[in-house]
Amino acid sequence: MSVSSPETRPALSAPEGAALLAKPDSDTVLEVKGLVKEYPGTRALDGVDLQIHRGEIHALLGENGAGKSTLIRLICGATRPTEGQILFEGRLVELNSPQQAQDLGVAVVHQHFNLVPQLSVAENLFLSQTLPRRVGLFVNWTVIEKRAAKLLDRVGLKINPWTEVSGLRPDENAMVAIAKAIGSDARIIILDEPTSALLPAEVSILFGHMRRLASEGHSFLYVSHRLAEVFEIADRVTVLRDGRRAGAWTREQMSRKTIIKAIVGGDKPWIDDTDGGRQDLGEPVFVANGLTGGRVRELSFELRSGEILGFAGLPGSGAEEALDLLFARSAASGGQLKAHGKVLRLRSPRDAKNAGIALVPKNRHAESLLSGASVRENISLPNLHRFVTDPVTRFIRRSKERTEGKEIATRLAIKMSSIEASIDSLSGGNQQKAILARWLASGAKIFMLNSPTAAVDIGAKADIYNLIREIAASGAGVIFTSTEVEEFPRVCHRVIVFRDGVVVGELTGAGATEANIMHLAVGGEDER
Amino acid sequence: MSASAGLNSSDRKAGFDLPAWLARYGTLASLAALLIVFSLARSDVFPTVDNLLNIMNQVSILGTMAFGLTVCLVMGLFDLSISAMATLGGYVATFLLVQYPDTISVPLAVLISLAVAGAIGVFNGLIVSYLGISAFIATLATGSIITGAMLGISNSKTIITGIPDEFLVIGQGSVFGVSNPILIMLAIGVILWLLLEHTQLGRHLYAIGGSAEASRLSGIAVKRYAPIALAICAGCAGLGGLIAASVLGAGRPQGVGDTYLLNAFAAVFIGASSLRPGKFHIIGTFIGVMLIGVINNGLSVMGVPTYWQYIVQGVLLIIALFSAGLLTMRRH
């Protein structure tokens, strides 16, 4: 990787990089040195350094799986490092519990703010603290109200402490969560994607408050996917990649290009070597025209037989939501959809299935697996109608069901003790294969896959990529989306990129690199 | 907990896994143990064909209702209206027979009363599917409505006179020494077993109970199934009450089903802890029903005061659910 700033070069490997960065002053409130965290089979963090100064807003960037959440868990005491040191105000500490980190002044504000919506703001603010009492018995609400008002005043929120949290705007929610953190004397406030639920106007209110609190000496570690926001608010940026620090920059040194490059790594080439590319693509099988619904606006595309089309975009951009819309899982308010030349009117997932469309949703355990059932039952779930003896009693011919299940499980090389084994006994990769087998057996001609390799180990990922290619090669059309940008160049022939619900660009073949996708997904002009 | 459990399962892969065995066969084993204990204690009275038929006769109404309840619990729906539904089943049939002795025959009265129960079951299901109210609350509400309606129609008076003998045969007759209620219970059991285990409807009910979202995304019209399941359950509850009315020779407008409500739930949940831990199924329910029957009969044969039946039943239910839960916990 080519580097422009002197700080980025040694950061990945050599300790002198850290020495350069850490100005040895008392201003550093939190310092992390050579942090390593190993989980069975994986090294989630591999020697990460990080310094947070007093009154600094420090952004932490990286793709999913880069190690951001592991780092946060270590800093807030949720888990212990395998190696490395954590120093608070220059003092070496060993964090054994979240309580300890809290006592040292670290507070985490999670993405969904962890507030109880049915309780009032005041009750939420002091939820985790011992409440003041009268006669050691009854809660002293007068004192609580005073303290709550004081805290709200400090974060600049003009709301009644007795307002129910469910009635607040998202940015007010965020500020209550921050007030709660400050109320527990937090010096370092970790914000995990706080803006994902916020509108632009609300984001700028939040940022205003953050700047003021930073100037009062509070430090923020700010995790976000939205690069534009990072440029707006961050004093410094640390980028993680594959469990290591890929670079750290001060506000003056940041540029979109270097940061995107650090996030995605060297531009990986088009790896798809098994596929000849687009020349052998067939007829259009799935065509959308101005489809609108939910977040997605005016979606038009043409999916051809044999093609793997990627829907890329940041979380909330509409890429994932488009799949739900196309499967009639959420309602469309306008536009037209055609499959194999025929206009579709889909009112339910059932209609979509009957039109030969398959959806593999993102969350295997909540949305696709039948936990506690056998592999056979999981494969035959959408296909039982093919095994009935007659249309009245609808008895199932189990031997036929079993034979077909075995056949397809063998074809996909699903590792299982038998077709009657519980689906829960299979590895994540094999579970996902069983879900794909379900839809292959259904004879679907249009496959929509949302993060099919999520929670699947590395070896099985390759199997699933191959399987997706085989599905396409057999003449089906495949729409693919993933939370991991690096998968698009590996899997897709063509990628369309979503931002704020609309398609902002299309990338084909060798042009569909991770960096190009990110540039489109992040959006805006290259301001630096 | 997880570490030791992990050790257990790998260490004992080849050998004998006691917790797993207990979760699967514990209830069956305790049923066998009870049979042996009671047989040894009262060898003159307990282990006879007559007493076995007696036990089955005592649980036949409970069994009929518990089998129906199994169907809606498979889908994850609690039906609390079964007690009111049983009262309705018995009262409506006797009411029709007494009010219109010339126009309504016994088969027709039975048919109408079961149809009314089934229709209310469908209504329960529509509330659950389309108003989004939980079955627990919806059936509690309709149960109350039914109870009120029965009291209103009857003026709180029990129907005793004018019930034709053909109706009494349902509960009091027998075929080759086996009483009709036993035969009805077994017939319902077989039918619902076939339905749950071997038809598309049954498989869809299990799928929805397992994961409604996965089922919906597999193209199953999830909303259609609550009315079906609750109608089957209501029909069985109505049939149970109808048998009770026939046995008793009276149409009571209140309280017929109350004794069965808790026992039916107990039987189905004990059933979910045997053979297939964590899953509701007809054979398990049958084991649960028999267990309750054997405890009650055995204890009374031994001269133990009645209140012990309740205590023993409660303790057994907790043990059964705990052992089934143990295996489920370990699986995850």
Image (spheres, coloured by chain):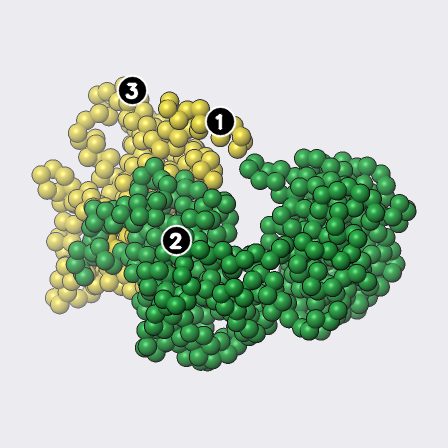
Chain colours: A green, B yellow
Quadrant of the snapshot with the C terminus of chain A: bottom right
Which residue is label 1 attached to? B7
Q: Residue B252 occupies which quadrant of the picture?
A: bottom left
Residue A293 visible somewhere in the drawing = yes
The amino acid type, in three-letter code, at marker 3 is Ala
- The mark closer to the camera, 3 or 1, is 1
| Both marks 2 and 3 on one chain | no
Label 1 Cα neighbours within 10 Å, binned few <14 / some 14-19 / many ≥20: few
- Circle 2 marks a residue in which chain? A
Q: Position of residue B281 (x, y in %)?
A: 31, 44
Q: Which mark is residue A467?
A: 2
Q: Position of residue A440 (x, y in %)?
A: 32, 57
Classify mark 3: helix, strand or loop: helix
Q: Report the number of discs.
A: 3
Q: CA distance from mark 1 to mark 2?
A: 35 Å
Q: Position of residue A368 (x, y in %)?
A: 42, 54
The amino acid type, in three-letter code, at marker 1 is Leu
Q: CA distance from mark 3 to mark 1?
A: 41 Å
The amino acid type, in three-letter code, at marker 2 is Leu
Q: Residue A70 occupies which quadrant of the picture?
A: top right
Residue at the image point whose x is 30% and y is 53% from the top: A380
As displayed, is residue A381 above or below residue A511?
Answer: above
Q: CA distance from mark 2 to mark 3?
A: 65 Å
- Circle 3 marks a residue in which chain? B
Which residue is label 3 attached to? B41
- The mark closer to the camera, 1 or 2, is 2
Mark earlier in primary sequence (3, 1): 1
Nearer to us in this view, B122 or A416: A416
Residue at the image point whose x is 31% and y is 39% from the top: A418
